[in-house]
Amino acid sequence: MKLPLWLAALLGLVMTQAALAQEQERKPNSLLLIAKPSLVDPNFQRTVVLVTQADDASTVGVILNRPTTLQLRRMLSREYPAENYRGAVYEGGPVMPHVLVALFRAESTPKGHAFPVLKGIYLTLHPENIEKLIADPKAGYRLYAGFSGWAPRQLQSEFMREDWYVQPADEAIVFRERMEGLWDELVEKAQRRGPRTRGLETRPGEIDPMARLGDALQ
């Protein structure tokens, strides 16, 4: 199946931007998108999505709260020690659902291409990174089938439609042991805060929340 032009460009950008990250240390750059109850798109209904943004405003991420019953062994070649991974494989999003994506902890910048999303936490599609994680029974990581992606300004238009609540990401949420009830909790928290500009919680001194995700949290 031929990929849409924007998706092909996004996939190329994922690899290009990650390659640049190996040449110069990038700052963690992430947010949580919480689907509003009015969002009925089945791809994202009742989801919490960890996202990071590339330099051209394309956005990639993974859905945090959709564990699946997928068997990791069926997604890997036989030489991979799939038994080392004891968690669920989560549904990362509608883009390339047969590709493994890993969200993982690392004390130093990984050699394979990866996006820094939080301090010491990275998101990667790179087979080298994933192979090393699966080979290490003590590694801290979570696996996803596929990922979520938005073309430049596509996500901004969804903000304008009031599709999402947005809040800073943190390690406790992204590696929460049980994801049941996460969406309900974050929606309730967002609704207690009251309406915010374009669904974003802004603070004095913040730049336009439609700008880069990382900058919006400074």
Image (tube, rainbow, N blue to C red):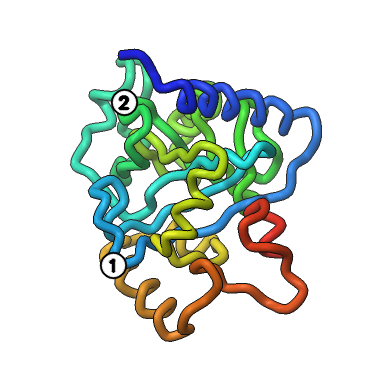
User: Is residue 119 something one can see in this rendering?
Assistant: no
Q: Mark 2 points at which residue?
A: 98
Q: How crowded is mark 1: few (under 14 residues within 10 Å), some or many (20 or more)?
A: some
Q: What amino acid is at disc 2?
A: His
Note whether 211 is above or below 150 in the view shown.
Answer: below
**Would residue 217 be found to the left or right of residue 14 on screen?**
right
Residue 81 position, x and y percent, is 36, 26
Dot 2: what SS?
A: strand
To which quarter of the image does residue 204 belong? bottom right
- Residue found 39% across the figure and 30% down from its top: 100
Foreground of the two, 27 or 141: 27
Q: How far apart are the alpha carbons under marks 2 and 1? A: 28 Å
Point out residue 137 in the picture as x, y percentages from the top left corner: 44, 38
| Relative image position of residue 143 (x, y in whole percent) | 39, 39
Q: Image point 67% across, 77% down: which residue?
A: 203
Kind of residue at badge 1: Pro
Q: Where is residue 26 in the image (x, y as percent from the top left)?
A: 74, 42
Q: Mark 1 points at which residue?
A: 37
Q: Picture quarter containing residue 82? A: top left
**In the structure shown, which secondary structural element does the residue marked by tag 1 occupy?**
loop
Disc on the earlier residue, 2 or 1: 1
Which circle marks residue 201 in the picture?
A: none
